[in-house]
Image: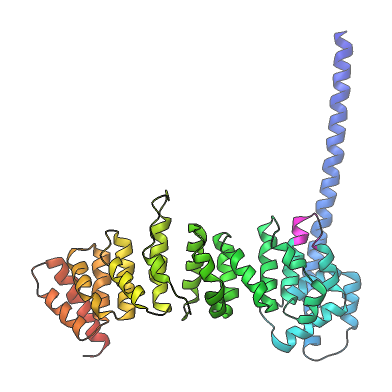
Amino acid sequence: MTRIELSVAALLLGGYALFFGVLLGVLARRASRMRRQAATAEALVPEIRDALVDYLAGSNDQTRIREFVRTNRLDVGDAVLSFQGTVGGTARDRLCDLALELALVHDWGQDTRSKEPAVRRAAYARLAFVCVYEPCQRVVGDLVTRALEDADPEVRLPAARALVQSGNITEIGRVFELAASQNLLIRILLTEDLRRYAAELSANMAPGILKSGDPKRVLAVLEMLVAWERALPLAGIHELLDYRDHDLLDNTDREIRIAALRLAPFVPLTPENRNAILRELTDTDSEVSTAAALTAGRLRLEESMPSLARCVRTGTAELARMAASALAAMPPRGWETLGELAAGPNPAAAFIASMALDKAKRKAAV
């Protein structure tokens, strides 16, 4: 009985070994075929690009391009996308029109329905590139809008960028709302894409999110607005400068106040904003008061001088330096205050004030 069992076991092991041997062989052949395809694509894409460059330069001869489309359709799509960031205006429109004529845009729309994540990501990246061209937008339809709900962030990003290219302020507002709930990398990329719509978004979309009561989204929007570094028609910042949420277990409430302080120089300086900045200068949190000192200096708030002088005398080294720099930005009264501090009995404050005053005078060539 034992001998029979051993024979059966040997046969089973032999069968398993044969199965895995065949499987490894199939995988090896597939890997070899993929390497050959990649090598072929690497060699062909420059040739396809050359043909596309000739076309963009004004040639109407599509013979070479159509031959590439017939034999290496996917590689043509890669070559088209490689022009992203290098062509614009009529040249980009001409390229997008060619993609339409060759039915490449239709193919990419079909690829968005693929179950393969890599195929879908590539499709949306290509659609994002051509959706600046209005005829392409009509062909694509609501594909990119639906993709905003996709579970794959690498699909949501190109879909969002495609909507920004459309120039439709309603869709752009949706992208802005989406960005507020995405991870930092996606938010950074979308913030740059949305920069040219800063005024409209800060006036129409940002206030609603800032009043939503969701601390993480509030902080995300504040960071986006600060990153635009331009004057914004946004009111009510004083409410965020005084933001306190004792139910939060992390430092989000402090981060919101600091982000609001950084935003303050870019929004209208209302009396409420001014008073809130002055209050933050006396905050016991040195990071908040340091951000307030920076803002007071940028806005040249002369009424902040007593608080800034106190920060130089009693604050941390970083806060004292920031407060001294703020005073240095407000001559002549700020310089007078620094001179008094430099002559005072506190050696640390005197040194910091003297350094800030000397630097300001050298800069002003006094």
| Any part of residue 44 in sight | no
| Any part of residue 152 in sight | yes
From this view, report whether residue 28 is shown above or below residue 356: above
Quadrant where the N terminus lies? top right
Q: Is residue 362 left or right of residue 160?
A: left
Q: Which residues are magenta?
A: 112-120
**Closest to the observer: 320 or 13?**
320
From this view, report whether residue 271 is shown above or below residue 248: below
Residue 11's x, y, as percent? 89, 23
Q: How many marks?
A: 0
From this view, report whether residue 186 is shown above or below residue 366: above
Magenta stretch holds residue 10: no
From this view, report whether residue 15 is shown above or below residue 51: above
Location of residue 264 (image quadrant): bottom left
* Display coloring: rainbow
Location of residue 353 (image quadrant): bottom left
Residue 329's x, y, as percent? 27, 81
Magenta stretch holds residue 113: yes
Quadrant where the C terminus lies? bottom left
Residue 273's x, y, as percent? 36, 73
Q: Is residue 199 left or right of residue 278?
A: right
**Closest to the observer: 301 or 42?**
301
Residue at 45 percent of width and 75 percent of height: 235
